[in-house]
């Protein structure tokens, strides 16, 4: 019945039943979602949300699945992937849909000779996810280049907020605690030297290649930086590099990453996270806060 209702307004090619979430997460783990639906525009998104509310079904908005871990039990409800991929320069601003990858945004800025987006060149998530968690790297954050965000509120109204209304802090924004869905964001345009931009992008790519386990499925940094400590440094000092539970391993290359060595389950990853948190608490009396989201 739910499928029949979904395909009344959504193309059947964009509605998947009993979909393995391991196909949609960078960790390559996760159980089955009852429904996985791709929304191509706001009208489709609202239709799915209203239907889910009417039928009392849970929903979750998915970006590129690069910062989440879906439990082995899967998701009872509808996972909605936003296919909002508009990307253009208008009125001296970059406008990017929530589904645009930030790596593509960085590439687009570079090709348009716009500086300031080099830091996101290696971040694998989407614009929506990056704004929601104020993604950052190499001393810069999304808040540094963002002008405004258009979103859908809980009553299906389309609204906009300016940069200073996002309540940005380290890996957080107002969207963390609201039932608002990011639709698109506008960003600053500052012209730069194309060769200098290219060089900076290459430098960042080299550092990532050298320091991060890019050749293995992972979800980036597992823990948030502390006020007075770096999780990776403590994990390394605790002698945990390479520690393995099932197919989940603390990266031998970067202690802040957990990698899937090939046959990890979500439970392996969760157990490893708990082991790290307990060990660091016991050894250094520090609490490690998760940066990844467990669904």
Image: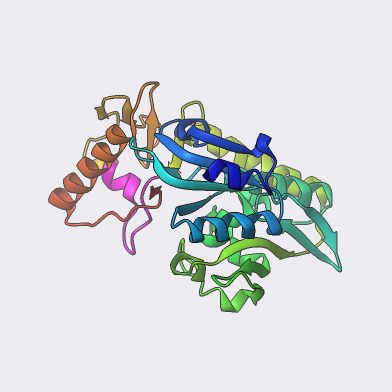
The colouring scheme, among rainbow, by chain, secondary structure or one colour, is rainbow
Magenta stretch in the rendered image: 222-235
Q: Name the residue located 82 percent from the left edge and 56 percent from the top edge.
A: 88
Residue 213, horizontal then vertical, whole percent: 46, 31
Q: How many marks can you see?
A: 0
Residue 132, horizontal then vertical, whole percent: 53, 61
Q: Is residue 217 above or below residue 173?
A: above
Q: Is residue 148 above or below residue 130?
A: below
Q: Please give left or right for residue 29 compared with residue 83 in the image.
A: left
Most prominent secondary structure in the magenta stretch? loop
Q: Is residue 213 above or below residue 235?
A: above
Q: Name the residue located 59 percent from the left edge and 35 percent from the top edge.
A: 206
Q: Name the residue located 15 percent from the left edge and 49 percent from the top edge.
A: 283
Q: Give whichever of 258, 242 is nearer the camera.
A: 258
Q: Please give left or right for residue 179 compared with residue 254 in the image.
A: right
Q: Give whichever of 112, 42 is nearer the camera.
A: 42
Residue 250, horizontal then vertical, whole percent: 32, 33
Q: Which residue occupies the extreme front position in the image?
A: 1
- Asked if the stretch drawn in magenta spans residue 233, the answer is yes
Q: Which residue occupies the extreme right position in the image?
A: 91
**Res. 207 image quadrant:** top right
Q: Which residue occupies the extreme left position in the image?
A: 282
Residue 269 appears in view: yes
Residue 35, horizontal then vertical, whole percent: 51, 41
Q: Is residue 113 above or below residue 266?
A: below
Residue 124 appears in view: no
- Asked if the stretch drawn in magenta spans residue 227, the answer is yes
């Amino acid at each position: 019945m739910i499928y029949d209702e979904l395909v009344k307004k959504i193309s059947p090619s964009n509605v998947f039943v009993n979909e393995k979430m391991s196909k949609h997460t960078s960790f390559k783990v996760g159980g089955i979602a009852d429904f996985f639906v791709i929304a191509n525009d706001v009208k489709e998104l609202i239709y799915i949300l209203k239907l889910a509310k009417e039928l009392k079904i849970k929903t979750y908005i998915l970006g590129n699945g690069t910062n989440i871990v879906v439990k082995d039990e899967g998701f009872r409800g509808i996972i909605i992937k936003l296919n909002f991929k508009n990307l253009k320069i208008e009125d001296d601003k970059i406008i990017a849909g929530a589904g645009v990858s930030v790596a593509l945004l960085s590439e687009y800025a570079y090709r348009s000779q716009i500086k300031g987006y080099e830091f996101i060149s290696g971040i694998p998530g989407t614009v929506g996810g990056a704004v929601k968690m104020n993604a950052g790297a190499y001393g810069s954050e999304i808040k540094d280049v963002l002008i405004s965000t258009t979103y859908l509120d809980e009553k299906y109204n389309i609204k906009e907020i300016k940069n200073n209304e996002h309540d940005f802090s380290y890996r957080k924004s107002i969207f963390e605690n609201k039932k608002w869905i990011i639709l698109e964001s506008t960003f600053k345009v500052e012209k730069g030297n194309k060769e200098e931009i290219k060089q900076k992008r290459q430098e960042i790519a080299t550092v990532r290649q050298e320091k991060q386990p890019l050749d293995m499925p992972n979800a980036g940094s597992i823990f948030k930086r502390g006020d007075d400590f770096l999780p990776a440094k403590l994990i390394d000092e605790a002698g945990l590099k390479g520690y393995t539970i099932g197919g989940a391993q603390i990266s031998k290359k970067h202690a802040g990453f957990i990698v899937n060595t090939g046959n990890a389950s979500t439970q392996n990853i969760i157990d490893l996270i708990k082991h790290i948190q307990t060990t660091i608490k016991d050894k250094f009396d520090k609490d490690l806060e998760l940066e990844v989201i467990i669904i």
